[in-house]
Image: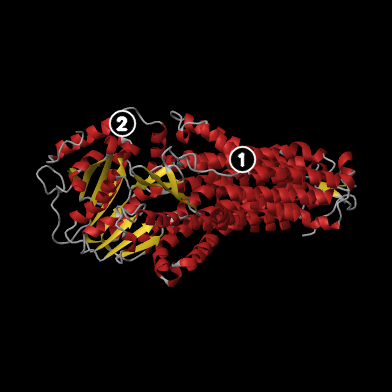
Amino acid sequence: MAIPAATDSAPREQVHPAPGPALAPLYALFVASGLTALVYEVMWMRSFSLVFGSSTRAASVVLASFFSGMAIGNLLGGRLARRSRSGALLGYALAELAIAAGALLVLAWLAVYRAGYPALYQSRLGTGPGLTALQLLLAFAAMAPPCAAMGATLPLISHALVSHAGHLGRRVGGVYALNTLGAAAGVLLSGFLLPVWIGTRASVYLAAWVNAAVGAAALLLWWLWRRAGPERPVPGGAPAPPRQAAAAPIGRDAVLLAPLAAAVSGFGTLALEVLYTRLIANAVDVSVYSFALMLGTFMVALALGSALVALVVDRLRSPWLLVAWASALGAAAILVSPSIFTWVRERSPTGGLYPGWGHLAWLAGFGMLVMGPAVVPIGVILPTVWKTAARRAEDAGRRIGGLTGINTLAAVAGSLAGGFLILPALGVSGGIAAIGLLYGALALLVLLRVTTGARRWVACAALAAGLAALASVRPWRALPLDLAPQERLVEYREGDSATVAVTREPRGLVLRLNNFYVLGSSRPGGIVVHRSQGQLGLLLHPDPRDVAFIGVATGLSLSAIKDFPAVRTAVAMELVPGVIEAASAFARANRDVLRDPRVEILVADGRNHLFGTDRRFDVIIGDLFVPWHPGTGNLYTAEHFRIVADRLKAGGLVVQWLQADQLSIEELRIIVATFTDAFPDAQLWLNRIQEGRPLLALVGRAPGGGERSAGPPGPDGRLAADPPLSRITFVCDGPALRRWAASAPRNTDDHPIIEFSAAATRLDRPAGEQRRMLALLARLAREAGSAGADPAG
């Protein structure tokens, strides 16, 4: 791409409408456009995960398709922006209308994919790299048209806003900052309100309606501009500000500097977003609210950087110096940000879990302290590069479109590299250091090109010395685990999906995910509880031959098959690859079940695999899933329970475990109502664990089959006299459950109530809720006439 150097000739003749158009409405329209773009991104990520699965790889495929479509739009919009300013405004209006139409078509594509995906999954393409390539192709085919239209909006509106080069930085930087703030608002709306209030599909409809309204308003503005009079040339154009006109020459090879800076900015920003998300996940138990708040905070920091550009860049003699020093400041802040993270975390309550919704206020402040000092300066880079490249008003849209396209393609690479290369190879701390040094290298390169004489060497030496000093003290070292005084680290892995650790404490081994969440332990009580989770369904089925486990964790639940020689196959599905590797450390506790020839380990999303496969099972056992974690709410929806029902043989059983202290009574009622719709022949069991925290098991039976278990075999309602199973108590059956839960709303893919409600309950759990939960179980048992012992005892 040919970028004019500072020594280019004076600006050519320029055009603008007469009289001057009102620009304020355009700023307002672009804020709304930014908001809808992030609503689409979040809702499409949710929707595609229901087809492709919730794995990190599938999510990255969708994200790459989204940004690739935008990059194409950036380049196309730059070419279309060669027209007059009013022509660019017309193009912008049509692009907004195209976004609305294309967004609705994505919903139709998703319906087609759901119908055909099982056949594709079972084909030869449905394994390994073939499946990833297939998902990428399908996602791109669906999202490319609306995403290309989104990408075209920036160069088109930039060309419409800029009448002379002297105010390019202020107008384009300002509108970009407002658009990014709108995007942050879209993230927060999508992460807090829209899916529960109106549902996923209706959220897309609402966003499409907003885009259509923005397009119509832009058409009206275009018509008013045309009525104001024909565009006429302004001889000589508007002169650049005096200080800028004296800019130092930077040489012909600077034509490569702008694309390089744009690429580094895109790659570094998205890679850093991935790394910071993983970093902060080591301090908080991430819920759907926490994730949205972290992403929104990141985008607010980017918007602040763009706003700074709008305020100062048009007054600068050499905008390239702003690029250099913003990169240098960003590099230094990135390198020290893990130290800030550690300092703040050590002075906060465990997980930062302040009472009530104050946790989110703490998290927003925590995120801004860790990310803000780094993200604000790197947010300066791209808008400043636009200013250096577009030396004339008529070049604004074309140059901005081209550079933004490069930036967006690099962002795709940064997102993928951050998750699949940098994290596994360097870890969170090493990855953050690498991105910091990348920005430092950009700063050095720019200083070498745009400064001359002694200033060049002094500035470069000072910057290199500063980076070397930071590298020597390694402020990014050592993060992530909070170990108790008598706890020792056994294994630690940072993979593309999560951070997995095995630690040893006096009572046994503990398996942790992202430092915060304990997946299981080999403590004596833990072995009993987890193994009984696998034994319940196998005992209730008269002849279990083929079984499936959704979730592996320590392998203790899976080890129940050792007590059932008749089991022929056991398919164990685990979403996080590092968990499978870590489970080998529990070989003694889990009876080395992973080496059992009957066991087939799949690194896969359990729901997605059951949706795609045509295999059927006698028993399917769902592990404990944290209901407020992003994506896990999909395992409590009506659609998931119907998928499970389709994968059961006649008379087959499903056992879904629930940790009652993670749910309110109303949330339990919603899950029970949703479950009993799919499995009218249901039962509720109680497995009491330490400190009075109850585990509940919803057991559902598919129609058909011959001999079946009639319910609790013992007169006291317990399953067996065996110590691991004597803790399990029958509560009630399907009719009692349906009577209690009949009026509850249903948890569906379109209205994911549990994922959001459980996150809110965790932040503001009513006092005495667990006591009321146990009293409820006792009442259900009495009303059903169960012979079981009083669950509240």
Choose mark 2 or mark 1, whichever is in front. Answer: 1
Question: From where the camera sits, is residue 22 visible?
Answer: no
Rendered residue at 37%/62% (across/down): 601
Task: Give the vertical position of 124 relative to 606 (above or below).
Answer: below
Coloring scheme used: secondary structure
Near-viewer residue (780 or 369): 369
Could you say where residue 695 lies in the image, as x and y percent from the top left? 28, 42
Secondary structure beneath disc 1? helix
| Rendering quarter of residue 747 | top left
Question: From where the camera sits, is residue 486 visible?
Answer: yes
Image mark count:
2
The amino acid type of the residue labelled 2 equals Glu
Which residue in the structure is indicated by mark 2? 769
Residue furthest out toward the left? 715
Which residue in the structure is indicated by mark 1? 337
Could you say where residue 592 lies in the image, as x and y percent from the top left? 32, 59
Secondary structure beneath disc 2? helix
Q: In which quarter of the image is the N terminus?
A: bottom right
In the image, taking residue 129 as reference, residue 272 lies left or right, namely: right
Pointer 2 or 1: first along the chain = 1
Mark 2 and mark 1: Cα distance apart in space: 39 Å
Task: Give the vertical position of 509 relative to 256 (above or below).
Answer: above
Near-viewer residue (34 or 375): 375
Residue furthest out toward the bottom? 124
